[in-house]
Image (cartoon, coloured by chain):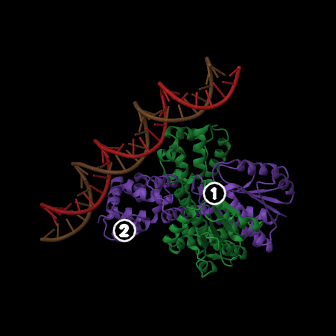
Chain colours: A green, B purple, C red, D brown
DNA sequence: CCGGATTTGGAATATATGTTCCATTTTGCT
DNA sequence: AGCAAAATGGAACATATATTCCAAATCCGG
């Protein structure tokens, strides 16, 4: 039991080993610490306890279980390992860049940057009015149909999941069984189509078909001039930064979640 | 003179501007701070004063000249900038709800902010070594099995898509047909499991089953102490901001793409 | 070299933070 | 259901740390 952890690594091992058999509150501490280890250096017990959702005294006990005499001793470990151990975000990316061309970490840094850039653009490229309109349309629909294929399928499936979770009737359309799906779309419903260049034929066809049935369409798509604009859909434009063969979907997903949440809360009120 | 610095950048500007005309001891403070700015977050006045070779009271005066009311206020600036200042988003969203602020654009802004914070954290929380190891494992597998259910399904499906696109044999496992899926996993394959708290039982079971077959497991999961750690999986930790049903998956997806791309390029060379 | 203004050191004080203790609640067992 | 053991919350207490104040030292213009 004794042996106080002498390094962050030992600390993490200890945490893992100990956290299996821990009562509720102490487990909360363990979990919070596991995902916010770095905060220990700069936070007070009170702050950590609040973050973990427990009383300071509970957090105190947690420190003791970890092998320290108290919070101060535990904090000292992290304060000391902090010195010099934390270049800022920018230098960290540079450092990762220096690694081999195709190393995982190097790629990760690239994608993180691409995603950040995309997110920054997002607020500019989405028209607030169109967003409000989209929320209206989807919130007042009897059933929301979601379609997104290939690369957009991940987004579509997440939206469908989120809507379901919020009790908004939603249906996810896949490539398979297209014929049946189409007949499921009825007046009073709405369609949310997600597609990016090169636009998948199936999605465009579905939008086209639906147009004739007085079913409003919301499109999550790229800013380029694309066929959907001519089809009278409410357009939410996302300009995602391309990187290599793949597109970081971060901004798209971010918009997707915001949209879903907005629809969910609008509906429930 | 007033105007307390609101960011590290402003702080540095102020420091530069002020340090020209300063008496001896205060100049020592300025110089020491200039080259040890980051220590402020984790040190006491006494420690800083000693480092600068002055009395605490002198250091105190220095803080005031910098525009702060005292050391504590100055320290707060650095502590907050260190943790990236993500004030608990869960409560922030709750707050938004209470205020009846669920307009689409407003929500979008919140989610963008949350995603940005998550991305910044991503580079901290992912262990580069573990990432390299994960790439190795997946690149040398005969077939990569991908599993992610519920909210992680979007990520799993995107990875499966990306891998396929890069000609890496991959198989996406769903909740349905679990029994058949399990038998498809054979020695020489690898499993990529994506799961976040609360961990879905099915995913954990699959990992458990597979362990006995000498199939290596890579897990894309959260930083919390979770069952996967004990199962000998290679852990890629993502700390994502999360509000109940709604999780900003931006960081997770970003890591997913980087991982997929790395595996793809590793394989083709 | 003198006198006033400025700067400095260090002790005294105020405040914030960590730590302990114990009454109360919850859990687990028979 | 009833009991003992474990866990918890909260307030009381102790300690560390920031902050202030003032007398002593230093600096500067005459």
Q: Residue at x 39, y 58 (%)?
A: B74
* Depicted A74 relative to depicted B110: above or below: above
Q: Nearer the viewer, residue B5 or A198?
A: A198
* Depicted A198 relative to depicted A257: above or below: below
How dense is the environment of label 2, judged by Cα within 10 Å: few (below 14), some, or many (20 and up)?
Answer: some
Are dots 2 and 1 in contact, CB under 8 Å? no
Q: Nearer the viewer, residue A101 or B182?
A: B182
Q: Residue B170 appears in which quarter of the rendering?
A: bottom right
Task: Using residue A49 as the reference point, say whether residue B251 is left or right of it.
Answer: right
Tell me residue A37's x, y (percent): 57, 52
Element at label 1: loop
Residue B184: image tag: none
Distance from disc 2 to disc 1, alpha carbons, whole Å, reads 56 Å
State which mark lies toward you, 2 or 1. 1
**Could you tell me if residue A98 is visible in this image?**
no
Q: Nearer the viewer, residue A70 or B240?
A: B240
**Could you tell me if residue A228 is visible in this image?**
yes
Residue annotated with mark 1: A169
Task: Using residue B125 as the reference point, say whether residue A269 is left or right of it.
Answer: left
Task: Using residue A180 as the reference point, say whether residue B226 is left or right of it.
Answer: left
Q: Residue C26 appears in which quarter of the rendering?
A: top right
Q: Residue at x 61, y 53 (%)?
A: A167
* Depicted A54 relative to depicted A41: above or below: above
Residue annotated with mark 2: B14
How dense is the environment of label 1, judged by Cα within 10 Å: few (below 14), some, or many (20 and up)?
Answer: some
Q: How many marks?
A: 2
Task: Using residue B70 as the reference point, say whether residue B183 is left or right of it.
Answer: right
Question: Do tags 2 and 1 sit on the same chain?
Answer: no
**Label 1 chain ID:** A
């Amino acid at each position: 039991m004794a042996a106080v952890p002498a390094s962050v690594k030992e600390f993490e091992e200890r945490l893992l080993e100990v956290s299996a058999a821990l009562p509720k509150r102490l487990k909360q501490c363990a979990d919070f610490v596991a995902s916010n280890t770095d905060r220990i250096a700069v936070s007070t017990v009170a702050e950590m306890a609040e973050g973990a959702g427990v009383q300071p005294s509970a957090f105190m006990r947690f420190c003791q279980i970890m092998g320290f005499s108290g919070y101060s001793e535990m904090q000292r470990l992290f304060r000391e390992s902090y010195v010099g151990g934390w270049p800022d975000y920018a230098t960290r990316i540079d450092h990762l860049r220096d690694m081999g061309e195709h190393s995982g970490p190097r790629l990760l840094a690239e994608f993180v940057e691409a995603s950040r850039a995309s997110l920054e653009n997002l607020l500019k490229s989405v028209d607030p009015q169109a967003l409000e309109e989209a929320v209206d349309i989807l919130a007042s629909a009897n059933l929301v149909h979601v379609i997104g294929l290939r690369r957009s399928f991940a987004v579509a499936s997440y939206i469908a999941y989120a809507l379901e979770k919020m009790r908004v009737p939603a249906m996810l359309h896949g490539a398979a069984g297209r014929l049946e799906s189409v007949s499921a779309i009825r007046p009073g419903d709405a369609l949310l189509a997600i597609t990016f260049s090169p636009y998948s034929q199936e999605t465009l066809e579905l939008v086209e078909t639906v147009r004739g049935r007085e079913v409003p369409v919301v499109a999550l798509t790229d800013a380029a001039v694309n066929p959907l604009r001519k089809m009278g859909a409410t357009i939410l434009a996302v300009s995602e930064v391309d990187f290599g063969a793949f597109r970081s979907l971060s901004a798209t997903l971010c918009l997707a979640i915001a949209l879903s949440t907005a629809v969910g809360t609008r509906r429930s009120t």
